[in-house]
Image: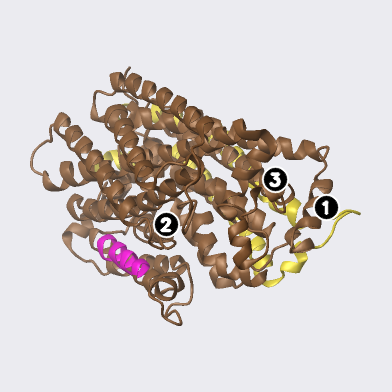
Chain colours: A yellow, B brown
Amino acid sequence: MTKEQIEQVKNNPKYQKLVSERSRFAWTLSIIMLVVYYAFIMTIAFNPEALGTKIGDGVMTIGIPIGIAIIFIAFVLAGIYVRRANGEFDELTREVREELGDIA
Amino acid sequence: MKKLLLLTLPLLLTVGAFAAGAIEGEVQKQPLNISAIIMFLIFVAGTLGITYWASKRTKTAKDFYTAGGGITGFQNGMAIAGDYMSAASFLGISGLVYLAGYDGLIYSIGFLVGWPIILFLISERLRNLGKYTFADVAAYRLKQTPIRTLAAFGSIATVILYLIAQMVGAGKLIQLLFGLPYELAVVLVGTLMILYVTFGGMLATTWVQIIKAILLLSGATFMALAVMSHFGFSLDAMFTAAIEVHGKGEAIMAPGGLVSDPISAISLGVALMFGTAGLPHILMRFFTVSDAKEARKSVFYATGFIGYFYILTFIIGFGAIIMVLNNPEYLDLAKQAISGGSPILGGKNMAAIHLSHAVGGNFFLGFISAVAFATILAVVSGLTLAGASAISHDLYANVFNKHGEVDEAKEMRVSKIATVALGILSVLLGIAFEQQNIAFVVGLAFAIAASANFPVLFLSMFWSKLTTRGAVIGGSLGLGTAILLVILGPIVWVQIFGNAEAIFPYKYPALFSVTVAFIAIWFFSITDKSDAAAKEIEAFEAQDIRSQTGIGAEGASEH
């Protein structure tokens, strides 16, 4: 790729849109996952009794649905990303490549 | 009980958490288990058939390393999940739940949360930039020789450490489950894995992994359902029954001091997350799919399968508390006579195996035993292929042979020779380490992956100012720090060398060694004012465009 070609790609408005939107989306989701995980780990480190709080009349503690929910959140966040990336972002990528013509 | 937990903790952490050998310490050889052996032979016959089929389709280097790039996202997701669901994460995590209840779940979660982040930040860039190994990505705009040497060293070290753990685990597990001698088991695993990899390459390795993943998920599902149906599918009834028989009582329903101080907790999190993203046999799987779209799908499916599997192991662990603990059939009488309590045959990591007998009789015990053996085979095959690729593709084709094009046929021959050599080496190491304490081995592999492989790979994709000098010095310092801190830490320094107190107090060095690596890479890059460095920085833009759009990326081969 020559310098001119690189400039051409970088100045393409659709390329700029793709890069900025996708990276904002990816980092937002990553931060959500990290916050959820480390909130859980910090609770275990500093206040483990909180997770032992009973819910309902039986022996079930709040920690169990929370733990299962984190597994579920990981899966759902992955699904949300794949849905948007394989749809909207891939479509945008295709348009970028079309506009660039011979470079791509 | 708390004391017991503390004593077994180091073992559990490395064994259960890091998917190392499933069984530690002395084991007694059991009588021959015929139904298990027959089912295992069926698995072997089936997988050798697949290897024969795959060998017909493995002609080029691309076929060998990446199955021609023609694996679908769903298949690859299953294979990635298979790499992750090793014998020890099945036996180790269910054993941890059996022993400590809720704490087992903490581990499962730590293992899983790295995956979405790999998806968001690295999977598609990796697919767009790489060809066969992750060194292709790290060395994309940097100097080939030093970067590939470092990456190959990191890969081979990770692979060999992991192989030792798997081999020792395999030998002990098979002694216990099948009643076969240790050496025979190790030689058998080595031979089969050499056959799969040399003849069938990535295609056979992937399908062996997929089949095993299906078998393991089905077996675990059946066990969890059997446990749940026993309690009329009421979780509350199951937990109540478990609390009644477990020595810790209601404490099994909440965190029990497994992750006690914040530094250890964060360091473990760093090791699990960055380590996963630096394991060569996992990274290699991203090159087996046709494009970034399939790469993303594979992580999504993998996350689903792994998450589901961990929920099953949680139920299986509780099932074992109810049906195995206090069941005289599984009691280790010899051990009980010495130490009291109610130890089970083969130790806590056998909880899931005994449960399979409790819910499905001898036939199902045989099935689960065969699946456990198959699991080890599938994991070592993937590891060996990754190690052989580092030798043939990174070292042979790009370092030793940098002048002129390398003949593809020759490169493939080298990778097959490397496979055989790694296979023989792992058999020898497996036998040599039979009586050794290997609890540190997989922890070390993860630390190296997180501190040497991951920082270089990550910054090469995200930071334009990375230079060869920064990558080499920083990566090497990360590697050195990880090794040093593991040696000075509680497992090696205290348990193996017998010193009273550890010089480095934490079991997981990742938080420290990863930080060292990132800071050193940053410092030695920004102070690098050479012309070569300027060119490398300039080359980032073209690389970034390819990683963002896939322009110029490797496609799938025509079949």
Q: Which residue corresponds to mark 2? A: B442
The kind of residue tagged 2 is Val
Q: Is residue B362 magenta?
A: no
Q: Residue at x 43, y 70 (%)?
A: B512
Q: Which residue corresponds to mark 3? A: B315
Label 3 residue SS: helix
Q: Is B470 on the left-hand or right-hand side of B5?
A: left
Q: Which residues are magenta?
A: B471-483
Q: Crowding at label 1, few (<14), some or many (≥20) Cα neighbours within 10 Å?
A: some
For marks 2 and 3, the one nearer the N-term is 3
Q: Residue at x 79, y 38 (%)?
A: B230
Q: How far across and down, in percent of the image, does residue B519 sit?
A: 37, 69
Q: Quadrant of the C terminus of chain B?
A: top left
Q: Is residue B73 visible?
A: no
Real-space Cα distance between discs 2 and 3?
Answer: 26 Å
Q: How far across and down, in percent of the image, does residue B476 sit?
A: 28, 64
The kind of residue tagged 3 is Ile
Q: Crowding at label 3, few (<14), some or many (≥20) Cα neighbours within 10 Å?
A: many
Q: Which residue corresponds to mark 1? A: B240
Q: Is residue B498 visible?
A: yes
In the rendered structure, are the residues bearing label 2 and label 1 in contact, judged by CB atoms less than 8 Å apart?
A: no
Q: How far across and down, in percent of the image, does residue A22 sit?
A: 51, 43
Q: Crowding at label 2, few (<14), some or many (≥20) Cα neighbours within 10 Å?
A: many
Q: How far across and down, in percent of the image, does residue B36 sit?
A: 52, 33
